[in-house]
Image (cartoon, rainbow, N blue to C red):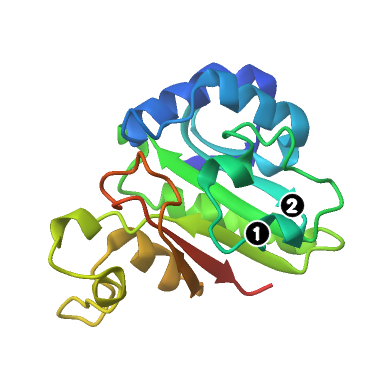
Amino acid sequence: MIRFRQSTLSDADAITRIEAESWPTFLAAPRSAIVPRIEVFSPGQWVALRGQQIVGAAFAQRVRPELLATSQPSYDQITDNATFQNTHDPAGSVYQLVGVGVAPEGQGCGVGRRLIDCQLQFARSLDGIQRIVGFTRPVGFHQFPELSIDDYLELRTANGRLQDPVLSFHLDSGARLVSVHPGFRSTDRDARGYGVLIEYPI
């Protein structure tokens, strides 16, 4: 049985392991970023547990809309280099989903989806939240070097779902694609540096 709760500082080491196991090395958040996230906004950091073992984690912060208003936002800019220290605003009207990771032993049973659902339910319970957004990755874009990002985002599987598994994960669950941003995260080679802004209904 999987259960979910908001994180505490005692979870930092386990969450660091989750990040290392579920993200490429150059994208995984280190402990030095995870601890500040919990310190500045522990209610927005969620974990999934199987028994007493943490098998998944999801992160979010509250931000002011001005933070996302720049035409070319970068991951480091809108997360304060992944720490949330200077970007999280307790009065921010935008709930920003930042990432979700699931350890191998937690995969295959919907942990990632349920973590996002926990985040959405929590965001909708907060006073003053007007938008729920996240920058996600077109993770399969590197497999289609001949395509533009716009053409890649039009690719569909035989059953009509988006070709990209990460975008499909969000859009199949009610999110909509808002905008596309080159240079969002230059180290993300799989996404060829792009970020895609998505928004869930409030």
The residue lying at 51 percent from left, 72 percent from top is 175
Where is residue 75? Give x, y as percent: 52, 45
Residue 130 drawn above or below residue 38: below
| Nearer mark to the viewer, of 1 and 2 | 1
Residue 133 drawn above or below residue 45: below
Find disc 2 in the rendering and name its residue. Answer: 63
- Looking at the rendered structure, the secondary structure element under dot 1 is helix
Where is residue 91? Give x, y as percent: 87, 52
- Looking at the rendered structure, the secondary structure element under dot 2 is strand
Where is residue 7? Give x, y as percent: 65, 32
Find disc 1 in the rendering and name its residue. Answer: 68
Q: Is residue 10 left or right of residue 190?
A: right
Residue 59 drawn above or below residue 53: below
Mark 2 is on which residue type? Val
Where is residue 22? Give x, y as percent: 35, 35
Q: Nearer the viewer, residue 25 or 103?
A: 25
Q: Is residue 9 left or right of residue 147?
A: right
The residue lying at 40 percent from left, 58 percent from top is 182
The residue lying at 65 percent from left, 64 percent from top is 132
Q: Is residue 13 left or right of residue 63?
A: left
Mark 1 is on which residue type? Leu
